[in-house]
Image (tube, rainbow, N blue to C red):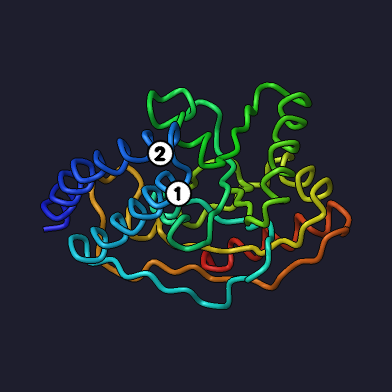
Amino acid sequence: MFLIRSLLFGIIFYIGSVPYVLSALLGAYISRPLLRSSVHGWSRFHHACAKWLLGIRVAVDGKLSEEPVLYAIKHEAMFETIDMPRLFHLPAVITKRELFDIPGWGTAAQSYGMIPVDREAGASALRAMITLARKIQAEGRPIVIFPEGTRVPHGQKPPLQSGFAGLYKLLGLPVVPIAVNSGVLTPKGKPWWKPGIMTYKVGETIPPGLPREEVEARVHAAINALND
């Protein structure tokens, strides 16, 4: 049953995504409001498909910030990546540079304000990322980073990537850490989703200006709160 529901979800979601992607691409060239509404509509469409086809409900444990902050989020599945525009107001998500090379999607993502990061390019990539992040920050938009750098199976706690501490220091923003348990609903190596509750657990806001060791330790503990 899990496999059948997951296959149905895949068919409906990916076919249904086509109009949103085309609309977002068009908006990237002619209309920022069209671009943004297309991205947000796609995220809500994904949420509806997950709810009604997969039986996945989303819960938020804690209060999200109403101020521009740096959100540091655990990353266990693609679910939370697509859910960001629905969860936050105009979030700028830091994501790997390779995704921007996807025809159509890359253009729309760049126009929306996604922030590319090239982990192999060193200091020059960090400077470019900071420049773009500061521009987004000036617009009053939240910035989202997955500080472990990539998706990890539920229960694993890898160290944070070094780029997180640099971003935290140079932007001077408070950090809101968020744990997720999406990996529980999609076991690694399995082609299906299980029904259940996908939880965002919002941690205590961490002020700017802390030493690297302290902020990394606090963020690491908070984003792994649902693994215990």
Give the quarter of the image for residue 71: bottom right
Can you say whether 215 is above or below 118 in the image? below
Real-space Cα distance between discs 2 and 1? Answer: 7 Å
Can you say whether 79 is above or below 24 in the image? below
Question: Which type of secondary structure does the marked residue at label 1 adopt?
Answer: helix
Which residue: 78% across, 26% down? 123
From the top left corner, tell me how far across and down residue 93 is, in percent: 56, 46
Quadrant of the image containing the N terminus = bottom left
- Give the residue at mark 1: 33
Which residue: 76% across, 45% down? 167
| Residue at the extreme front of the image, as rendered | 30
- Give the residue at mark 2: 27
From the top left corner, tell me how far across and down residue 72 is, in percent: 63, 56
Which residue: 40% across, 55% down? 183
From the top left corner, tell me how far across and down residue 207 is, in percent: 81, 66
Question: Which type of secondary structure does the marked residue at label 2 adopt?
Answer: helix
Query: Which numbered dot is residue 193?
Result: none
Q: Nearer the viewer, residue 120 or 105?
A: 105
CB within 8 Å, label 2 to label 1? yes
Describe residue 205's horizontal placement relative to residue 6 as left or right: right
